[in-house]
Every structure is written in C-alpha cells, then in structure tokens.
Image: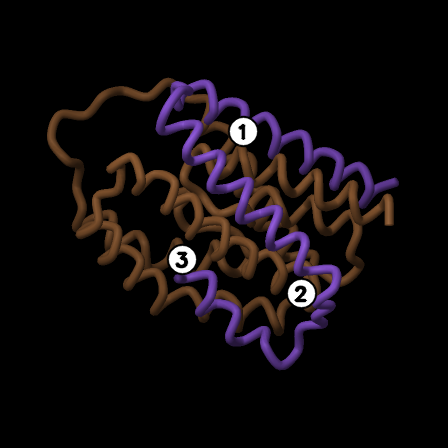
Amino acid sequence: MSGNLGIISGLFVLSVVSGMLGLGVAFAAVPFLDLFLPDLVHQVQPLSLLLNGITALFAVAGFAKSGNVEWRRAIILAMVTTVFAPAGAYAAQSIDQKLIWFVYFCSVIYLAYRLFKPVQERVGGGNFRLALILAMPISVLTVFSAWDPALC
Amino acid sequence: MPSFFALIPHLHTAHWDVRFMAPLVLAGAVGAFLGARLTSLYVPSGKIKQAFGALIVLVTLYKIYSLIR
C-alpha cells in the first residue's frame, strides 16, 4: 500500500510539472513507471499512453480556462499526429526493448538541450506548414517510445 | 488524441490492472490541471522548462543506473 502511495505521489508531481508546460506526462512517466513495472511494452507503454492522453486533456482544460489555446492550429496538429501515432506503437510491439530505451535516451539528451537552450523571440507565427510535415515522423518516433509529440 | 489512438495496437497485448491504474489516472488528471492553471496564473515558463528538463534527466539517469547495476 505504501509502495502504491509512493507511485501515486511521484506521478502527481510529474503531472503537475508536465501540466505546467501543457504536455502529457508520458515522457517523465516512462522511466518512472519502469522502476515499478517490469514489462516496458506491455505494462509501462500502454499505461503511459493512457496517462499521457488524460493528463494532456486536463492540461489543455487548464490553459483553455485562461484563454491560452490556439484552437485552430491545435486541432489540425492533433489530427495529423493522431493519424501517424499508431504506427510507432505497432513498431514498438515487434522491436527489442533495448532499442526502445536507446531511442528514449537519445531523445532525453536532445530535449534536455532544447529545454535549457535560451529561447529567442520569433517575429510572426512561425512556419506552421513545416511543423505539420515534421509532426508526421515525430509522432511515429515519439509514440514508439511512448512519450508525447508535443515535446518536440 | 494521438496517445489514445496509439493505444489501439496495445489493447490486445497490454496487461491492465484497473485497481493499480485508477488512482494513477486520477492523480495524473488532477496534477496536470493544477499545473496548467498554476502556469496560466503565476509562473514564468522558462524556469519550468528547465525544471522539467532537470527532472527528466534525473529520472533517466536513475533508470540507466538501475539498468547497469
């Protein structure tokens, strides 16, 4: 029971922090849950994806309440990533778990660099068409390791 | 939405334990909503990004340590 309380508390903290960034919790939840569940593909990944969807929905609700969601672009991006994401999940079913961890660790290095890099303000709204094109492979790769396309 | 659709390939092979999952889902939903509201109202996002980066690196380093131990 106390072990479960530790998992629930840890996940709550991870959810608050990822919710602050408007993300699902999967990216942080994968290594965290893997400490307690032995099977990456059949236990950790499905639970992380479920938690990711739910936490992302509630994070959107939190931001939307303050009027901070650009709905048109968000819906288009969500549709594109939704179409391509299952391909990553299918790939993960038939690939060695060590390769999944390798992809995950490489992603952590890249994202840690991106998160610590100073942000330069852009003039205009950015290149949305390019973002849509990149969202296709990104959604496959991110779901392959059971984390969140929004992090990219 | 992408996460829910990506669950489809896992549906037949996943090992679900509803009693274990239900409190995690509840904690995740409440935590994410609180986090988003906090950011919207009070906290600058640059610091949060770095905190999140540090948190993920720490959890991942522990995972690597547990793999090679």
Q: CA distance from mark 1 to mark 3?
A: 20 Å
Which residue, given by chain and number where applicable, does mark 3 sit on? A139
Task: Name the amino acid type tagged 3.
Answer: Ser
Q: What element does badge 2 sit on?
A: helix
Task: In the rendered view, tell whether residue A141 sits above or below residue B59.
Answer: below
Q: What element does badge 3 sit on?
A: helix
* Residue A39 or residue B43, whichever sits in front: B43
Please tell me the numbered disc located at residue B53. 1
> Splitting the image into 4 quarters, where does residue A124 fall?
top left
Q: Residue at point 75% right, 40% down?
A: B64
Q: CA distance from mark 2 to mark 3?
A: 17 Å
Output the chain of dot 2.
A
Output the chain of dot 1.
B
What hue represents chain B?
purple
Q: CA distance from mark 1 to mark 2?
A: 24 Å
Task: Name the amino acid type tagged 1.
Answer: Gly
* Residue A127 rendering spot, x and y as whole percentages: 17, 41
Task: Name the amino acid type tagged 2.
Answer: Val
Query: Which tag, 2 or 3, sits closer to the chain's start?
Result: 2
* Residue A91 or residue B35, whichever sits in front: B35
Q: What element does badge 1 sit on?
A: helix
Please tell me the numbered disc located at residue A41. 2
Circle 1 Cα neighbour tier, 10 Å, few/some/many (<14 / 14–19 / ≥20):
many
* Residue A21 rendering spot, x and y as whole percentages: 43, 34
Figure quadrant of the C terminus of chain A:
top left
Residue A79 located left or right of residue A46: left
Circle 3 Cα neighbour tier, 10 Å, few/some/many (<14 / 14–19 / ≥20):
many
Marks 1 and 2 on same chain: no
Q: Residue at point 60% right, 56% down?
A: A48
